[in-house]
Image (cartoon, rainbow, N blue to C red):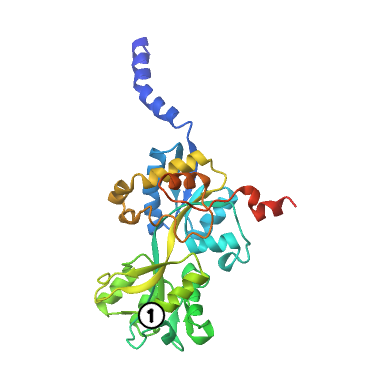
């Protein structure tokens, strides 16, 4: 090869080398999301790009088994951040419900809540007007051990009911929809951001009625379980829904490894909440980003870096010094 040709090749490669070298100083992180057909995966891909662009981290969104798997993968060091529902996060921190056998884990911290996942209780029986009316009825409470199952149990227990008082059915969203349509069940719990396609389809073809979770019942649930927040399903969300429906929500939340640096998590938090409008233009769930709701309903402590970002915006949140962590102390006994 002639000298001039070599020089031309080197000049042509310089932009490529610059791009490769620019990423050498970035902290590479895996972001656990959910199944490829779900909201977590698509939304996570958008957030990963913003965190990569506006922080010293290089974030890659990967498909996963969802909330519990993401928490366990952070604990194992396979993921550095992930999506989880705020209730599952509380179970992990306390070692209860879906984490009762695994035990508590304190290897993660909260970055922020992104949007509501709403507890929706619906039926095709107009005589079912309250949770108490579920007594003796066939009710889908979600798949066994799922997040929906534990949400349903919280609602039932708040109303003074147990599984012995109903005829529980353990079904997915689509299976619940089909069972209601075929008259095989009387009511179903679904936990997702409304409008939820399975409910919309049923409301369009058959008509549904919604069972409110409000008043004293909602107050009791909120008092007993701080990972819930109050919400309404606005009138018109579904075909034939003429009034607001009171209910409760858990939060779709981003958590990070407790081992990440404060500066990096500060930058990652800003990468999301400083660019809310841009993110909303790329994913519909981005329209729900808000500093007003980013810190509510959290039953685990925030990362110091995220706390610094929120403090700059007038919001105080709970953090945890590792020296004050009872699990950390126990590991050294």
Q: Is residue 323 left or right of 61 when viewed as pictured?
A: right
- Residue under the image location 69 percent in, 52 percent down: 329
Residue 293, quarter of picture: bottom left
Q: Estimate the x, y position of residue 208 in percent, counting from the top left.
A: 30, 79
Residue under numbered circle 1: 179
The correct choice, above or below, for 312 with respect to 138 in the image is: above
Most distant residue in the right direction: 333
Most distant residue in the top direction: 3
How crowded pointer 1 is (Cα within 10 Å; few <14, some 14-19, many 20+) is rated as some
- Residue under the image location 45 percent in, 46 percent down: 311
Residue closer to the observer: 202 or 163? 163
Using the rendered image of the protein, determine whether residue 37 is visible from the camera's viewpoint: no
Q: How many marks?
A: 1
The image quadrant where one finds the N terminus is top left
Q: Secondary structure at mark 1?
A: helix
Q: Estimate the x, y position of residue 278 in percent, counting from the top left.
A: 30, 46
Q: Estimate the x, y position of residue 273 in percent, counting from the top left.
A: 37, 47
The correct choice, above or below, for 180 with respect to 234 in the image is: below
Q: Estimate the x, y position of residue 178 in percent, counting from the top left.
A: 36, 77
Using the rendered image of the protein, determine whether residue 306 is visible from the camera's viewpoint: yes
The correct choice, above or below, for 230 with respect to 211 in the image is: above
Q: Is residue 93 left or right of 87 when viewed as pictured?
A: right
- Residue under the image location 71 percent in, 54 percent down: 330
The correct choice, above or below, for 9 with respect to 32 in the image is: above
């Amino acid at each position: 090869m002639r000298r001039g040709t070599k020089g031309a090749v080197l000049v042509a490669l310089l932009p490529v080398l610059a791009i490769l070298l620019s990423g050498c100083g970035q902290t590479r992180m895996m972001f656990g999301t959910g199944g490829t057909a779900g909201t977590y995966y698509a939304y996570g891909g958008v957030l990963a790009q913003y965190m990569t662009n506006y922080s010293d981290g290089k974030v890659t969104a990967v498909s996963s088994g969802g909330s519990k798997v993401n928490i366990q993968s952070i604990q194992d060091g396979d993921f550095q951040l992930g999506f989880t529902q705020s209730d599952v996060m509380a179970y992990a921190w306390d070692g209860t419900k879906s984490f009762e056998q695994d035990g508590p884990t304190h290897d993660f911290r909260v970055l922020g809540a992104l949007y509501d996942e709403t507890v929706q209780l619906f039926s095709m029986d107009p005589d079912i007007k309250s949770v108490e009316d579920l007594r003796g009825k066939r009710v889908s409470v979600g798949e066994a051990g799922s997040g929906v199952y534990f949400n349903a149990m919280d609602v039932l227990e708040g109303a003074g009911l147990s599984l012995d008082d109903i005829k529980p059915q353990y079904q997915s969203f689509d299976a619940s929809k089909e069972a209601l349509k075929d008259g095989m069940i009387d009511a179903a719990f679904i936990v997702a951001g409304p409008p939820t396609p399975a409910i919309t389809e049923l409301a369009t073809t058959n008509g549904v009625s919604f069972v409110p979770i409000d008043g004293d019942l909602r107050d009791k649930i909120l008092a007993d379980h701080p990972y819930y927040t109050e919400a309404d399903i606005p009138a018109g969300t579904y075909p034939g829904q003429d009034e607001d429906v009171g209910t409760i929500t858990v939060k779709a939340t981003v958590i990070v490894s407790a081992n990440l640096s404060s500066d990096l998590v500060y930058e990652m938090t800003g990468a999301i909440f400083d660019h809310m409008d841009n993110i909303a233009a790329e994913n519909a769930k981005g329209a729900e980003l808000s500093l007003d709701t980013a810190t509510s309903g959290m039953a685990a402590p925030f990362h110091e870096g995220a706390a610094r970002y929120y403090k700059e915006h007038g919001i105080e949140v709970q953090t945890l010094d590792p020296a004050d962590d009872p699990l950390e102390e126990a590991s050294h006994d």
